[in-house]
Amino acid sequence: MEKIYLHWKVCFFTEAILVMLLLVALWVSFKNRKTHEELKFFPVYIAFLLIVFISLYANIYSEKVWNYSINTFNFHHYIDYTSTIIELFVFAHFFIHVISSKKMRQFIILISIIFTIYYLIELIHDKRFVRSISKTTQSRVYTIESIILLVPCIGYFYELFKKPPILNLKQEPSFWIVSGLSFFITSTLPYSLIENYLRKSHLYLMTTLYSVFYIFYIILLLMIIRAYICLPKKSIS
């Protein structure tokens, strides 16, 4: 556990807080999984994020696992890379349910298909494939995914501001999710754009700044939890 503790210390324990909040979010999402149809697949998303950290800690804690990952097959990098496509699919499903515009829904489906093809091309052409996936590739693919998800966020708010002000936004799960996602993407995108540069030239700074990245992930998870505790629409008179 000392190795994991030191790993958390480097990130100013923001990662530890994030992992604990993921456990809370997973419990809340499973407990309320039938409450909001648009949040149907969020438990899968949250659970997979947890698996990413569990695989990381397995690498840190066990020297045998670490050696296997370095010399044979880095399962943590594959799990981390897979979490990106799962994140896209979960949020794409969400936006298709909450956005009214047919053109925007078609765009989300089309761009998801295009991104999946791009995702596979990046995987196959990675210099470490099949043994592993480079952090450079992971960062590049994640950045593209973030930019893609920002588009339906803008589309959602555009539709929201066009509607008559009759919605109780405090009880709209979609409002909390999109607000959290928009804030997360716009706050972390500058870092994502320069992450590969920092990895090459300022590795310590990159690691330190990642604690800020985790803070915004914590805010996103709090927004997701808040969305789950909104009243079901049928209960609102």
Image (spheres, helix red, strand yellow):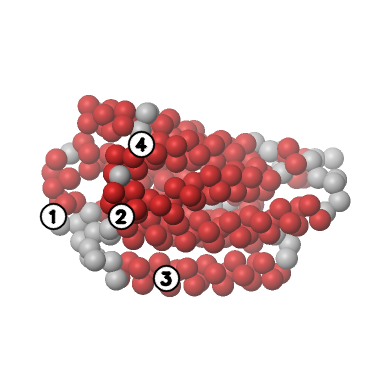
Q: Amino acid at mark 4?
A: Thr
User: What amino acid does circle 3 point to?
Assistant: Tyr
- Residue indicated by mark 3: 118
In this rendering, the answer to whether 113 lies above or below 227 is below
Marks 2/4: CA distance? 16 Å
* Secondary-structure class at tag 4: helix
The tag earlier along the polypeptide, 1 or 4, is 1
From the image, tell me which residue sits under label 4: 208
Name the residue carrying label 2: 135
Residue drawn at point x = 74 percent, y = 56 percent: 158
Q: Give how far across and how far down residue 59 sits, in percent.
A: 22, 43
Residue 105 location (% of width, % of height): 65, 67
N-terminal of the pair, mark 2 or mark 1, is: 1
Is residue 204 positioned above or below 89 on the image? above
Provide residue 93's location: percent of width, then percent of height: 58, 59
Tell me the mark number nearer the camera, choosing from 2 and 1.
Answer: 2
Q: Which of the image's four quarters has the N terminus?
A: top left
Q: Which residue is mark 1?
A: 71
**Residue drawn at 43 percent across, 51 percent down:** 192
Spatial CA span between label 2 and label 3: 16 Å
Residue drawn 67% across the image and 48% down it: 174
Residue 57 occupies quadrant: top left
Q: Find residue 227 and report its image quarter.
A: top right
Q: Nearer the viewer, mark 2 or mark 3?
A: 2
